[in-house]
Amino acid sequence: MELTQKQTTGIGYEIFEKFWNTNQGWIIQLGKNLLLTLIIVIIAAICVKIARKLIVQSPKKLVKIDDSIYKVCFTVVRVVIWLVAALITLDIFGFNTASLLTILGAAGLTVGLAMKDSMSNIASGVMLLVLRPYKTGDFVACGSTTGTIKEMGLFSTVMETFEGIFVSVPNNAIFGNPITNYSRNPMRRAVITVGISYGDSLQKGLEVLREMLEKNELILKDPAPEVLVADLADSSVNLTIRFWADNANYWTAYWQVKEQIKSTIEDAGLNIPFPQRVVTVVNQEK
C-alpha cells in the first residue's frame, strides 16, 4: 500500500519527535557547546588581531628593537592564544585536558629528541634574537655565506647575496660560527696598496696620494687618512693607503680612490712598475 504525502510527513515527524524526546538533553548541551566554541573562536581571533596591532603593527613600539623580533614574539603569542582556546574548547566538550597535556608533553619530548637539530636551530634563533649580533638590513659574513639580512626567524635566517641570490641559513650554522657584521659600526676603514718605482721620489709619491685623499669629500678627516711605506718589494716600493668613511659611503669612496690612484701617480710623473726579472744567459760553448 502506497503512503500518501501526509502520511509520510507524519511518519517523519514522529521519528523526529521520538529522536528529540530521547536525546533532548544531549542536543541542547551540544548546541550550547557549539555556541560556546564559536564564541571562544571569535574571542581568540580578536585577541590575535589585537596582539598583531600591539606587537607588529604598532607605529610606536615600547622598545626600539629589530622588527623580526616583534614578528617572532607575535608568532609565539598567536600560538599560545590558539592553544589556550583549543584547550578550553576540549574542556567544554568533556575531554580530560590534564591527561591530554600529559600526552602532549610526552609526545613533545619524543618529537624533540627526534628533531634535536631543529630544536637546536630554535635555541640558536632565540639566542640570536636576544644577543642581536645583526638586524634586518645588515651586511654580514658568517662562515662561507656573505649577504644582507632579509628576515630573521626561529629556525633560519634569510640572506641575499651580492648577486641577488636567496640564501636560507639554519640558525645553528650561524650561531656556531664567528659573525662579521659590516654594518654595525657607523664607519669603516679601507686599506689599498699601490707600488711606485724605485727610481721615483718616495716623498713625492706620499705627498700626491695624501693630497688625493684630502680632496675626496667622502673620506673622513677624523680619523685622518694615511699614506705609509708598507714594503720594499722586489720590483716596487709599496705604499699603503688607509682612510675611513661612513658606512653608507664606504664602497663609493673605495672605488673612487681605486680609480684615482693610477691617474694621480701618472700625472705626478711617477710610475707604477710591473714585476721584473733579470735573466742572465751563460754561454757554455767551448
Image (cartoon, helix red, strand yellow):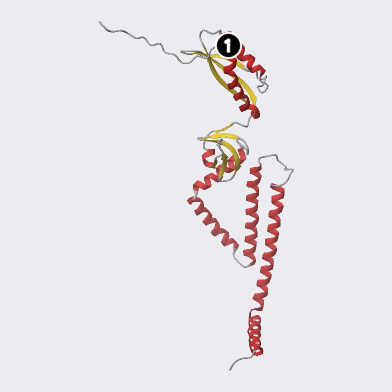
Q: Which of 182 and 196 lies nearest the eye of the viewer?
A: 196
The quadrant holding residue 222 is top right
From the top left corner, tell me how far across and down residue 255 is, in percent: 59, 25
Left/right of residue 275 with respect to residue 135 in the rendered view: left
Q: Residue at x 59, y 40 (%)?
A: 128
Amino acid at the residue labelled 1: Gly
Instruction: Tell me the residue that label 1 is attached to.
Output: 205
Q: Residue at x 52, y 45 (%)?
A: 120
Left/right of residue 161 with respect to residue 44 in the rendered view: left
From the top left corner, tell me how far across and down residue 109 is, in percent: 52, 53
Q: Residue furthest right?
A: 60
Q: Which of 261 and 113 lies nearest the eye of the viewer?
A: 261
Q: Can residue 31 be seen?
A: yes
Q: In which quadrant will I find the N terminus?
A: bottom right
From the top left corner, tell me how far across and down residue 282 is, in percent: 32, 8
Q: Residue at x 64, y 43 (%)?
A: 69
Dot 1, how many residues are within 10 Å of its Cα: few (below 14), some (14-19), or many (20+)? many
Q: Residue furthest top?
A: 286
Q: Which of 134 and 62 lies nearest the eye of the viewer?
A: 134
Q: Residue at x 69, y 68 (%)?
A: 35
From the top left corner, tell me how far across and down residue 168 is, in percent: 54, 43
The quadrant holding residue 94 is bottom right
Q: Is residue 115 above or below residue 193?
A: below
Q: Which of 100 and 13 lies nearest the eye of the viewer?
A: 13
Q: Can residue 187 be seen?
A: no
Question: Helix or strand or loop: what does disc 1 sit on?
Answer: helix
Q: Is residue 249 above or below residue 62?
A: above
Q: In which quadrant will I find the C terminus?
A: top left
Q: Is residue 56 above or below residue 177?
A: below
